[in-house]
Amino acid sequence: MKIKKHFIVCLAVMAVVAAGVVYFFPIKQANEKQIARSACQVKEITFYYLEGCEWCNKVKTEGTIDKIEQLGVKINKINAAVGPVRHKFQGVPTFVISGKVYEGYRTFDDLKILLECPKEINPAESDSSTPSSFE
């Protein structure tokens, strides 16, 4: 009787694990496809910011970070006060694109040029009026 009970428990555990794999695998696969489909030449950048920085908050409120991510570019968002800081710069906001450091405020269009995106490509407008946080 104990063996039958253990067998049923094992089957239940395997079913839960299988359901988890089926649920989470397509999400990861979709994110990888989005990055692979990026129309921009640059696929990943680093963005350094500080919470109290007026220009960093302007980048956030304009939705620049969200728009870049919608283009399929991965953004490593790093709070410069917390780290890890892997590049030399003197102020924020700072963008690191293809190993080159760009200090100071940049518009979405400025960054699109630095990311070598086609001029005609624009991300779909977000339904939400509130931009996502940096973290």
Image: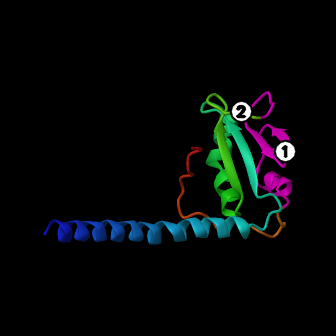
C-alpha distance separating marks 2 and 1: 14 Å
Between 51 and 54, which is closer to the camera in this rendering? 51
Who's the residue at 67% across and 36% down the image? 49
Between 2 and 65, which is closer to the camera in this rendering? 2
Badge 2: how crowded within 10 Å, few (<14), some, or many (20+)? few
Who's the residue at 79% across and 37% down the image? 104
Q: Residue 85: give its label.
A: 2
Badge 1: how crowded within 10 Å, few (<14), some, or many (20+)? few
Task: Report x, y in % for residue 81.
Answer: 64, 28
Task: Report x, y in % for residue 9.
Answer: 25, 66
Q: Residue 115: give its label.
A: none
Q: Residue 99: give its label.
A: 1
- Read off the magenta span: 87-116
Which type of secondary structure does the marked residue at label 1 adopt?
loop
Task: Report x, y in % for residue 5.
Answer: 18, 68
Q: Is residue 119 placed above or below 48 in the rendered structure?
A: below
